[in-house]
Amino acid sequence: METFVFYIFSAFMVLSALMVITVNNPVKAAFFLVLSFFASAAIWLLLEAEFLAIILVIVYVGAVMVLFLFVVMMLDINMAQIKRGFVNNLPLAVAVAIAMFVTIFFVVGGESFSESVFTIPDRHGADYSNVAELGKVLYTDYVYSFEIAAVILLVGIIAAISLTLRRRPNTRHQKIEDQVAVKSKDRLQVVKVDAQPKKYEPAKEEQK
Amino acid sequence: MNFVTPDFMPAMPEIFLLTMVCAILIIDLFLKDDSRGATYMLSLIALAATAVLSFTGYSQETVTTFNGSFILDPMASILKVAICIVVMGVFIYAKDYLIDRNIYKGEYFILGLFGVLGMMVMVSAGNFLTVYLGLELLSLSMYAMIAMQRDSAIASEAAMKYFILGAIASGMLLYGMSMVYGVTGSLDLATINKAVSTADRVVMSFGLVFIILGIAFKLGAVPFHMWMPDVYQGSPTSVTLYISSAPKIAAFAMMYRLLVDGLTDMHADWQMILIILSVLSMALGNIIAIAQTNLKRMFAYSTIAHVGFIVMGVLTGTQAGYGASMFYAIVYAIMSVGGFGMIALLSRAGFEADNIDDFKGLNQKSPWFAFIMMAILFSMAGVPPFLGFWAKISVLQEAVNSGLVWLAIVGVVTSVIGAFYYLRVVKVIYFDKPMDNTPIKASMDIRMALSINGVAILALGLYPTALIALCINTFS
């Protein structure tokens, strides 16, 4: 039964991954990528890696791919231009791909990672918490790597901001702090005007 | 479970540097554009202090901490000091160039410092994870630094090329690591080294090929050198200074950690691959450099040739060979930072002194800087008594000692070919008439640093024993 489920999801994953690179419409390609993420999440579930499976769905499907879809929809991608030369190079590409596949298959396929070489890990009971186990090693044994990964994220933020932030001093925009700090006398000018105009006196204005 | 708090002391330089970068990042936010000099000074102070901390942490024993993911050995300490000093030079040379081009931003220094942190992580990496994370920290900083000059199409192109090829190379490296992890069951380099003898040989070799591919890309060895000329030429000189110097030291350390710390027993397998890389790099780098008229591009090809020598030292598989290679990597970084520093010195607002013709008659404008440029070029060519000569000779000696005489001969022949294009620049400096009479305008610190750099190449070349002994002793 488990093997059957595994093959179902594997087939889904491989086929949708193929579709990602072959369909014409980039939006459809993004959706196929989502499908292949779902399938790999299911395979992780079979391997008792519940936390990774959930994170894959939440982070990649829920956040990354949604953002990605927005970007794809906003860009005007000219598929004809991208596909130019596709047919001409296809035979060479297919030949290289097949050669690579065959060599890799014979070197690392099946035998080297089979059950005879590696023992199958023990099954864990229902009370086993994948998240707790991950958390324990993440913050103890791998704390150094964990911190460096955090620094990499920080660099990513700095890089993204410094590459996209454009200060344009000429644009008209609100100065919120000035607006909040404004006093009534800055805005309102009380000008005393007599009810009865006096006799005409040129060039003498009464102003506060 | 029992968890012992790791010993933080060996990682003190890294921790200090990270704290300083974060502090500088926040301070820089509150600075006005005209007081950006504070960021520059703070960055230099941070680097100097990190170098001092790395130096004081030097010990002959090998210390591991953080569950084996951090190694502190003599090589790590020496390389960290070298990286910090070289990057200090980079920052000093880059300052005027950045101001002239209106890209004098705090991000340049902050990303540069983060890159240094990444290099230090690579240098003392104890397992696959830290090697990879350090590499990515360095690479990400460099991609962003190249792309920072947004209005320049050629810089954006260089950044895109570097980013895409770098991502593919990282993918290859990870694939190789995953194969090795698959058959040895460990990410820890020391554990992998013990497991090599019992592991599946075919899969190990398969993983090894991909790991070497990743290393060769980062080093820029032929045939994975395609990115180097375009990226060196396309980046602003301030960034070329950075990517051409210290990262090569880190790439040497990565090669040492992965191949020697992790896969010593597969020496016979990787030696063959490295020989091919070395021969191709030396030949192709030196020959194509002859045809270049752009100095940055010429230096890129000369870097490829130098990388061939660095690889040659490692492939001997002897302790002395690693020492020679390490010496070469440090010497190369010193020469490269000086060479690009000269380009930065001669450039001014709206003018890029990156053609060989721009150096015409430099001797008439400034005999002192003409002399320094000559020292750098002679050193790169391997003319005695300059520093580069000793680097070349120590690597060649180790190649001969381990029976690879033909490889040493290839090295010598290609160096002689390479001498041509270095000497041509020297000829242009001394015997041609200047194209214009604009005086060299540079602030005191860049003049001082370049002078020290040039004198160091000569002085260390006259008294090379101390530095060579330091590098050789590292591995014995």
Image (cartoon, rainbow, N blue to C red):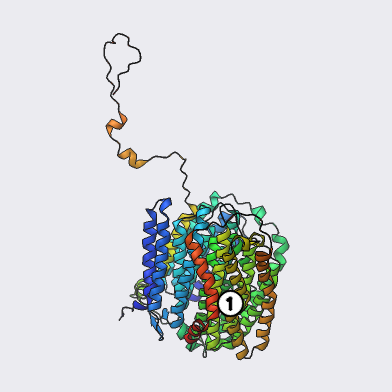
- The image quarter in which residue B313 lies: bottom right
Q: From the viewer's perspective, is B271 left or right of B60?
A: right
Residue identifier under label 1: B386
Residue B318: image x %, image y %? 55, 89
Q: Residues within 10 Å of mark 1 (few under 14, many from 20)?
A: many
Q: Is residue B332 visible?
A: yes
Q: Nearer the viewer, residue B169 or A78?
A: B169
Residue shown at 59%/49% (left/top)? A76
Q: Nearer the viewer, residue A114 or A155?
A: A155
- The image quarter in which residue B49 lies: bottom left
Q: From the viewer's perspective, is A98 left or right of B372?
A: right
Residue A77: image x %, image y %? 60, 51
Residue shown at 45%/73% (left/top)? B120
Query: Vertical placement of B236 versus B277: above or below?
Result: above
Query: Vertical placement of A203 versus B259: above or below?
Result: above
Considering the numbered disc 1 on the image, is that residue within a helix, a strand or a loop?
A: loop
The N terminus of chain B, quarter of image: bottom left
Residue B78: image x %, image y %? 45, 78
Q: Is residue A15 visible?
A: no
Query: Vertical placement of A21 versus B324: above or below?
Result: above
Total number of numbered labels?
1
Chain at numbered mark 1: B
Amino acid under disc 1: Phe
Residue shown at 33%/75% (left/top)? A127
- The image quarter in which residue B8 lies: bottom left
Residue B29: image x %, image y %? 39, 54
Q: Nearer the viewer, residue B281 or B342?
A: B342
